[in-house]
Amino acid sequence: MGRSYQLGLFIRGDVDVKDLHQAERFKPSATRRDFLGLAAAWSAVLAFMMAMLGAFRLPMPSVFPESDSKVKLGHPNRFEIGTSTYYPKHQLWLFRDEQGFYAISSICTHLGCVAERKENGKFDCPCHGSKFSVEGEIEGGPAPKGLLWLDLSVSPEGVLVADTLSDVNVGTRLTA
Ligand code: FES
């Protein structure tokens, strides 16, 4: 076709004058804007996928609240006078002495770590150093109060039951 002249414009190449105003002629090839748009779209998809992954990994409580706060501890005859029994699943100690039964929660009243019972019968919290007497009373550290004495009862079947959501005064015994 060669060169054509129309309205003073110089047109190079094999473009027919009648095709000059066809829209396809003005369609740009891939541009930087296309690339950035695509990158943004993929970033959004990736961000969404990461958010979904994160949602599946939401922090789960390490200690689940009991659906039923009543914990069966066993028949009273199982426990000799002068013994202590730990229930790790419920983080409580059951004691029997001459006056009866009592249960002490080993959950520290500061921030909820499990206090360890030492050989001398006292409790130490490994997290921030709270110390408790053999009866769970506060002896030092940041804990605002002593370990809780839990409400004990005997079920209709004759089984000792501790209520992990109900506490009693220090020194309270259950005679069974
Ligand atoms: S949780 Fe026990 S001292 Fe902080």
Image (cartoon, rainbow, N blue to C red):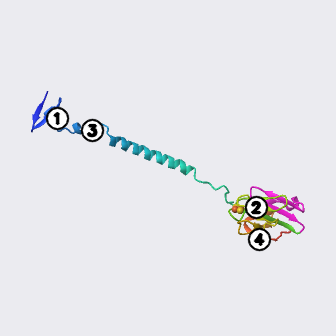
Which residue is disc 2 drawn over?
Answer: 106
Proximity of marks 1 and 2: CB atoms separated by less than 8 Å: no
**Amino acid carrying mark 2 in the image:** Ser
Q: Earlier in the sequence, mark 4 or mark 3?
A: 3
The span from disc 4 to disc 3 (Cα, nearest Å) is 81 Å
The span from disc 4 to disc 1 (Cα, nearest Å) is 95 Å
Q: Quadrant of residue 101?
A: bottom right
Proximity of marks 1 and 3: CB atoms separated by less than 8 Å: no
Which residue is disc 3 drawn over?
Answer: 28
Camera-side mark, 1 or 2: 2
Which type of secondary structure does the marked residue at label 1 adopt? helix
Q: Earlier in the sequence, mark 2 or mark 4?
A: 2
Residue 78 in view (yes/no): yes
Q: Is residue 59 left or right of residue 128?
A: left
Location of residue 37 with respect to 116 vertically, above or below: above
Which residue is disc 1 drawn over?
Answer: 19
Camera-side mark, 1 or 3: 3
Residue 69 at x, y percent in the picture: 71, 63
**Dot 2, crowdedness within 10 Å: few (<14), some or many (≥20)?**
many
**Amino acid carrying mark 4 in the image:** Val
Proximity of marks 2 and 3: CB atoms separated by less than 8 Å: no
**Dot 1, crowdedness within 10 Å: few (<14), some or many (≥20)?**
few
